[in-house]
């Protein structure tokens, strides 16, 4: 089932030029995209390519200037739909510190359900459940600012989960984290996806794209390619134009194949590649 | 450096006073602050001292951290005491205790200086017992709950409480950012530690501007995050935290109210009784 549909969507920002005139800058332009229920979709592109604009269009933080965005069949341009849409689209942003509403973890997670007007007892249930899903139960009474980046970002995910959304959008949520923190957040995202959550991961780390069902490559506000990770990694030209680079393992696989080794260019596991090379050499 | 600054002075504990409802504690602290101004005699000040010591003992907060709170107002204390000593004139016919040129010191001046001194000290100690035993978060909830009646006059109680709560949660990250900016500017040769007052104040402009700009950026991101989490104002919001009154609140309230009823009664009746039980008014 299709849960998100973007039809020829455009968004422009106001740009203030040096000479004092006001022009416009492309946020996204002519984007058509559809996401199915339960998918794990990665949205990649270099900084300023329109990834975050696209994310903000998904839950009505921005309303398209052209085209339509529908979530579960609801048009984001209609004001009366916004609340329902935001209930279904959980969003986690880049800087964990700037998303914390309260100075105690459990109260921060409770912010969403409190806004929905959920009865007190159910809020406690939802908060406990959300913290369990991200593995942060023991930190419920702590102050978020003493936690690590990865932990803070997991709290932010819990805050989104407590609303019980069907779609989770991670808008560069791993960009500010160290490798350990990134791993923590990605593990949570994949676990949620395995439980049926539709996940949209926005990132510029290509390694994070490896395990996704579908990759959307953006450049200068346009979607330039949609495909599986291996398909995308094959297209070196496209990636270069978009200011990206395939993960080392993918590049290695291609280099080996070009050098005449009998390895699958779709292989992204370094260990398996190594095994393949050894087998080739034995022959 | 700046990172060690913590907001509020909560002293974690599990005592009778810690477990009391923040709303009751807030009301009782206000009662104490008002009540202290109705204390007129040293004997009653003695009673207040005993009461305060008893509360501090029950709250199990170290006396040292309670007394530390006085440090902040020491200048104010000395100033008011000095003014009282030198500018209080004795009653008619009373000889000054000591005089030189136009300066005269009377016994009445010493007495009123001592009383003002005690009042201010007890005021600060009383409120610091509240902040030592109550987390800032609990205090915010208490303020929201107590201000609720003001909704009738359209006072935005919820928004007010939310602002307090956001302020609390952003103080640590703002301190961190200030620290970072200071170090960045120092690395580029900024000098904050030498020169006169004006020069030093000017040196802080390169810190304030990035901090302010950063603050606006944070505010926008926070607004997006809050909107994404279905924030639509106070209309139908519920609250996870339930504040329950317990027997402790009853006991605490009873003790405080009984004590200050006594203080108010003494104050009101001072005229008739002042002959019979003069020692209470000394």
Image: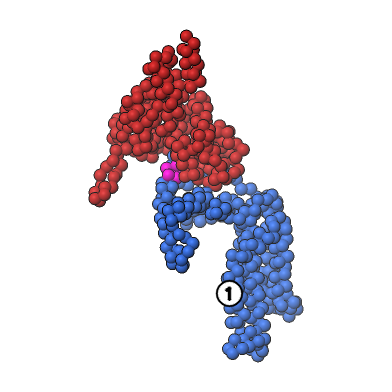
Chain colours: A red, B blue
Q: Nearer the viewer, residue B173 or A272?
A: A272
Q: Nearer the viewer, residue A249 or A205?
A: A249
Examine the structure image and report whether residue B222 is included in the region drawn in magenta.
yes
Q: Quadrant of the C terminus of chain B?
A: bottom right
Rendered residue at 51%/32% (across/down): A183
Q: Chain of mark 1?
A: B
Residue A144 drawn above or below residue A215? below
Rendered residue at 39%/35% (across/down): A55
Rendered residue at 66%/60% (across/down): B66
- The x and y percentages for residue A97 are 49, 44
Q: Quadrant of residue B242?
A: top right
Residue A233 drawn above or below residue B181? above
Residue B140 visible in the displayed image:
no
Residue B275 drawn above or below residue B209? below
Q: Quadrant of residue B209?
A: bottom left
Locate residue A274 relative to residue B244 in the image: left or right.
left
Task: Provide the residue designation for mark 1.
Answer: B79
Q: Main secondary structure of the magenta part?
A: helix
User: In this picture, which residue range is highlighted in magenta?
Assistant: B221-226
- The x and y percentages for residue B233 are 45, 46
Rendered residue at 29%/33% (across/down): A29
């Amino acid at each position: 089932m299709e849960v998100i549909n973007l039809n020829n969507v455009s968004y422009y920002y106001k740009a203030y030029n040096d000479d004092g005139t006001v022009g416009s800058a492309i946020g996204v332009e002519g984007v058509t995209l559809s996401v199915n229920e339960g998918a794990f979709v990665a949205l990649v592109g270099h900084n300023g390519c329109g990834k975050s604009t696209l994310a903000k269009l998904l839950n009505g933080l921005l309303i398209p200037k052209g085209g339509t965005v529908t979530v579960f069949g609801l048009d984001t341009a209609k004001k009366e739909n916004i609340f329902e849409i935001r209930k279904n689209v959980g969003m986690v942003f880049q800087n964990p510190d700037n998303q914390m509403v309260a100075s105690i973890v459990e109260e921060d997670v409770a912010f969403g359900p409190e806004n929905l007007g959920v009865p007190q007892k159910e809020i406690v249930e939802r908060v406990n459940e959300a913290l369990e899903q991200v593995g942060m139960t023991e930190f419920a009474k702590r102050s978020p600012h003493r936690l690590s980046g990865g932990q803070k970002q997991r709290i932010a995910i819990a805050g989104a989960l407590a609303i019980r959304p069907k779609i989770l959008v991670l808008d560069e949520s791993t960009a500010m984290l160290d490798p350990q923190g990134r791993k923590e957040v990605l593990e949570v995202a994949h676990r949620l996806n395995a439980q049926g959550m539709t996940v949209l991961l926005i990132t510029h780390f290509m390694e994070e794209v490896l395990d996704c069902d579908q990759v959307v490559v953006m450049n200068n506000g346009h979607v330039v390619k949609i495909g599986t990770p291996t398909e995308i990694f094959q297209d070196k030209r496209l990636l270069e134009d978009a200011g990206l680079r395939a993960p080392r393992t993918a590049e290695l696989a291609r280099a080996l194949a070009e050098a005449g080794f009998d390895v699958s260019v779709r292989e992204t596991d370094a260990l398996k590649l190594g095994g393949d090379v050894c087998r080739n050499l034995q022959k | 450096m700046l990172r060690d600054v913590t907001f509020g002075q909560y002293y974690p504990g599990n005592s009778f006073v810690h477990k009391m409802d923040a709303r009751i504690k807030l009301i009782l602290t206000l009662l104490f602050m008002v009540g202290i101004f109705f204390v007129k005699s040293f004997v009653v000040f003695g009673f207040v001292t005993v009461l305060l010591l008893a509360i501090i003992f029950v709250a199990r907060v170290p006396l040292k951290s309670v007394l530390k709170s006085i440090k902040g107002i020491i200048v104010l204390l000395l100033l008011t005491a000095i003014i009282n000593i030198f500018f209080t004139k004795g009653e008619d016919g009373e000889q000054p205790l000591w005089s030189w040129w136009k300066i005269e010191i009377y016994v009445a001046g010493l007495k009123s200086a001592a009383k003002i001194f005690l009042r201010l000290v007890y005021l600060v100690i009383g409120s610091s017992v509240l902040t030592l035993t109550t987390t800032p978060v609990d205090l915010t909830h208490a303020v929201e709950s107590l201000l609720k009646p003001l909704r009738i006059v359209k006072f935005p109680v919820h928004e007010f409480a939310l602002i307090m709560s956001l302020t609390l949660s952003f103080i640590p990250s703002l301190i961190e950012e200030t620290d970072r900016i200071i170090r960045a500017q120092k690395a580029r040769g900024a000098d904050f530690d030498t020169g006169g007052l004006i020069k030093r104040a000017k040196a802080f402009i390169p810190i304030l501007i990035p901090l302010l700009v950063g603050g606006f950026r944070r505010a926008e991101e926070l607004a997006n995050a809050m909107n994404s989490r279905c924030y639509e104002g106070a209309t139908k919001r519920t609250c996870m935290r339930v504040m329950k009154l317990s027997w402790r609140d009853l006991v605490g309230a009873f003790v405080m109210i009984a004590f200050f009823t006594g203080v108010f009664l003494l104050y009101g009746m001072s005229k008739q009784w002042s002959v019979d039980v003069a020692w209470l008014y000394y």
